[in-house]
Image (spheres, rainbow, N blue to C red):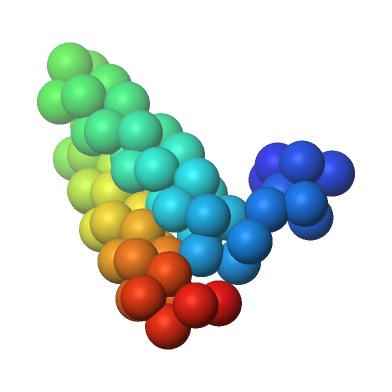
């Protein structure tokens, strides 16, 4: 997703950045789903937010472990 820039980052930082991006994208999808009455889009957005939050936590754990 982030291309060349992500290769220069530590694994933990990369996970946090990508997790944040997924979390934000999911939030946008959820809001759009609510605004349009599209339950599927809303659910996809919520799932993407959870995926992003999980990836950010993995980045936190990697940081603690020094990776």
Front one among 28 and 13: 13
User: Which quadrant is home to the C terminus?
Assistant: bottom right
The location of residue 3, given as percent across then percent down, is 80, 44
Is 53 placed above or below 36 here? below
Tell me the quarter of the picture where residue 60 sits: bottom left
Q: Is residue 12 left or right of residue 45?
A: right
Tell me the quarter of the picture where residue 32 sits: top left
Front one among 11 and 65: 65
Is 25 placed above or below 49 here? above
The location of residue 38, given as percent across then percent down, is 23, 32
Q: Is residue 51 something one can see in this rendering?
A: no
The residue drawn where x is 34% and y is 43% is 23
Q: Is residue 24 something one can see in this rendering?
A: yes
Q: Is residue 42 left or right of residue 6?
A: left
Is 52 placed above or below 27 here? below
**Which residue in the rendered view is the most extreme toward the right?**
4
The location of residue 33, given as percent across then percent down, is 24, 29
**Which residue in the rendered view is the most extreme toward the top?**
35
């Amino acid at each position: 997703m982030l291309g060349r820039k992500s290769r220069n980052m530590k694994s933990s930082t990369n996970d946090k950045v990508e997790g944040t991006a997924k979390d934000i994208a999911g939030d946008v999808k959820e809001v759009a789903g609510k605004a349009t009455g599209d339950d599927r889009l809303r659910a996809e957005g919520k799932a993407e937010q959870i995926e992003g939050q999980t990836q950010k936590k993995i980045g936190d754990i990697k940081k603690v472990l020094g990776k």
